[in-house]
Amino acid sequence: APQLDGYFKQVDDMSDAFIERLRQAVAIPSISSEAARRPDVVRMGHWLADELNKLGAQAELRPLGKQHGTDLDLPPVVLARYGNDKNKRTILVYGHYDVQPAEKEDGWETEPFELTVKEDGRMLGRGSTDDKGPVLGWLNAIEAHKAAGIEFPVNLLMCFEGMEEYGSDGLDDLINAEAKKYFADADAVCISDNYWLGTERPCLTYGLRGCNYYSIEVSGPGADLHSGVFGGTAQEPMTDLVRILGSLVDTDGKIQIPGIAEQVAPVTAEEDGLYDGISFTMETLHESLGSKTTIFDDKKKTLMARWRNPSLSIHGIEGAFSAPGAKTVIPAKVIGKFSIRTVPNMEIEKTNECVAKYVEDVFKKLGSKNTMKVYPQHCGNWWVASPKHWNFAAAAKATERVWGVQPDFTREGGSIPVTLTFEQATGKNVLLLPMGSSTDGAHSINEKLDKRNYIEGTKLLGAYLHYVAEEPQN
Amino acid sequence: APQLDGYFKQVDDMSDAFIERLRQAVAIPSISSEAARRPDVVRMGHWLADELNKLGAQAELRPLGKQHGTDLDLPPVVLARYGNDKNKRTILVYGHYDVQPAEKEDGWETEPFELTVKEDGRMLGRGSTDDKGPVLGWLNAIEAHKAAGIEFPVNLLMCFEGMEEYGSDGLDDLINAEAKKYFADADAVCISDNYWLGTERPCLTYGLRGCNYYSIEVSGPGADLHSGVFGGTAQEPMTDLVRILGSLVDTDGKIQIPGIAEQVAPVTAEEDGLYDGISFTMETLHESLGSKTTIFDDKKKTLMARWRNPSLSIHGIEGAFSAPGAKTVIPAKVIGKFSIRTVPNMEIEKTNECVAKYVEDVFKKLGSKNTMKVYPQHCGNWWVASPKHWNFAAAAKATERVWGVQPDFTREGGSIPVTLTFEQATGKNVLLLPMGSSTDGAHSINEKLDKRNYIEGTKLLGAYLHYVAEEPQN
Ligand SMILES: [Zn+2]
Ligand SMILES: [Zn+2]
Ligand SMILES: [Zn+2]
Ligand SMILES: [Zn+2]
């Protein structure tokens, strides 16, 4: 890809303008979870479409109807196309222009909606890394190509939504509806909305765990009771619930439900060899955990536990006393919440059946007169792509060119549901190509994107498109 | 007690005036838990002292200083004396003039602070039965004696507080300070602030369970974690906590902590014979429970479980996810709350030691790297008086005279801490002499006192004082 030197130089030359573009984007508080901020989210969508059109893309705003259960209009999805050359590959990219809530009072060292560039290169601001920086990376890449007079190597399809931080209401329907229309000529998909595993080594991400979220409801008395009057005479729902919750998983994270471990794909010799090379240390984990209370003491077992093994977490109890202080209540109805992170080759339905059967068996053994129900609240499948696809090969070459190192091939423990939606709707390979690093604090106070990651990341996105154009079909 | 016929007739004749007195008292919204209502609580104390003084008692308002941890003045305690004849016995009575919160919007069928007398005799209003009706019963008794020209049979000392529904802040100190001063000549104590076991049979109450309230704190990570990122790699405090909580008690209320059951006083043959005669049915219990999820199917075991056996209730968890919906959090620090209702001959310290040892053992067996602390939040002792004391004998005779039946001798499962304070401070026998019935709904919407219970209850309080005057020393 000989044109890259010119492209890189152009990106460096325009870096102030690119930071200015990010500053404008951060200044719009597009918080999707707050109804009062909805006009700002819509404004952000319009701003983004305008920017794209100014760059010569064809951008349009797609309405998604009303927000589920409300009278509130959803923010539009920005769909855009840049280039329509049948002789070029077409890459579909996704990002989101909405952000998490933020207030200075939460403890920010700067105004969250004023991008502040520090001397050490940190660019603080809500949305800087999640996900306005990466979204603007694509715009910057277009602009730098134009400015440098370098032909854009692919056709670019863009899908930028405004509800990602609040459940992506309506997005799946749009993706499915456009798969054979607006997205019809996509050859591969690229999403830049996750993070490096650490702060130095770039990575390409090819796997995500799924999540099955369950409720266990135990009820008995008609109303909350006073433990003085009824303690010892009534069977208490909380007693049953904590006994059930206590039977699900042990301190070392071993899931006690039969039929879960049996579904997990065995480790191949090839996979077994991958972990040692990953740039990750237990010290980094201890730092992000804020303690040394890890289950494992070594990196390989820890990475496997996060990426390729299921886990079960108990999140809390609804309906019980949860405030500070002391209250002598016997709660009448309590709902325990837990979730299982799922991995290949676990099946959602089969897992739900195992959970229901186990919980019902445990409850039966308690011999309780109370009523128990266990049901999934929501289930999202795991995702694993082939990292040998030309889409990943191109990204790996681009990474080596920009960062001078081979990327780690990583998976993640969490879910990015849209990944699976794109894969299933388009039938194409999906690549997760992160721009930011592990210390960016996406949903925390003082969210930042390092200037280096933004500028080199813009180079990376452009370089990826060049290698994509050259890479042979698998 | 030959004067009682005249006294009873006088009470009947004045019943409208007594209801009017209750109406005035209910009209003052003396909610002690709400700072904004504090002036109403103080106004209620002044109203009560004024009423007493009008009746010829010597009432005074005793300030208690500031409410703990605030700048708010506590409402005064009303101390009053009626009669000072060395040849008469002196009875110290206690009650409270503050009430629980109430708003029409909570679901009341009437305005909570307007006493509404229904055709069926229910007198609805906040504080009607808890505890303004019983407190005014003493004032009514004085007034009816005066009006009928019947000599008051005893000296009456009164102690009416305004913070009972919010922890009786400052009261213990005052009782201890006045035990050998204002209360020095008390021969016995009578408290009317509890309820019949059912709706037809009056009772005298001679026992209360104590309550030890515990927290179990488990912490590990420095902050709440995302279960996608950390699930499977970190030891989760919630996992440890639910396993500990699940080990405390079984579905049938059997406490699993060694050393608790061993402290419980054995059932004597005499006690064993008492339960069958008590006016109580499982149907009543099912009705108040709103379900049939009782531990026992028979009355005797149920009454023993409520009155004379310890029980353990798990109240909830602080620091975990407790809202509706789904949140994939791994809470960093969770605090489980449970309490043990204590009975003779359990000792507070010994019980705390058993709890600490057991919980620490269970936690140790988990093999967790998290940090666990277990500690009592507050402990109040059980109380059992001798129902053969002349104080009880007088009350039993009065009950038979007014209601035409022998009272049940009952204990309660809950605590009324002031009972023990009076017993220990004065060294005298304490009697609990309820006026209202089990359906009054003291802390609920539509709190009521039946007109019959108010008027016959006023007769009962006066008759009790006459029998007290006659009853020989034990
Ligand atoms: Zn994001
Ligand atoms: Zn996000
Ligand atoms: Zn009361
Ligand atoms: Zn009360």
Image (tube, coloured by chain):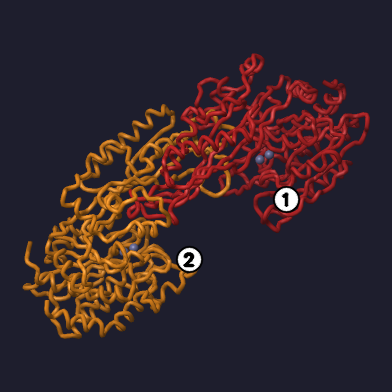
Chain colours: A red, B orange
Query: In the rendering, at what x and y percent does residue A161 appear?
Result: 75, 44
Q: Is residue B39 visible?
A: no
Q: Residue furthest right?
A: A86
At a point 21% along the width and 74% down the height, the residue shown is B402
Report the quarter where the N terminus of chain A lies: top right
Query: In the rendering, at what x and y percent does residue B118 appear?
Result: 40, 77
Mark 1 lies on residue? A41
Mark 2 lies on residue? B106
Question: In the shown orientation, is residue B203 left or right of residue A352?
Answer: left
Disc 1 element: helix
Query: In the rendering, at what x and y percent does residue A397 appear?
Result: 78, 21
Q: Quadrant location of residue B30? A: bottom left
Q: Which mark is residue A11?
A: none
Q: Is residue B471 visible?
A: yes
At a point 36% along the width and 40% down the height, the residue shown is B249
Chain under label 1? A
Chain under label 2? B
Mark 1 surroundings: few (<14), some (14-19) or many (≥20) residues within 10 A: many
Would you say the residues marked 2 and 1 are in contact, meaning their CB atoms lie under 8 Å apart?
Answer: no
Quadrant of the rendered image holding ligand 3:
bottom left
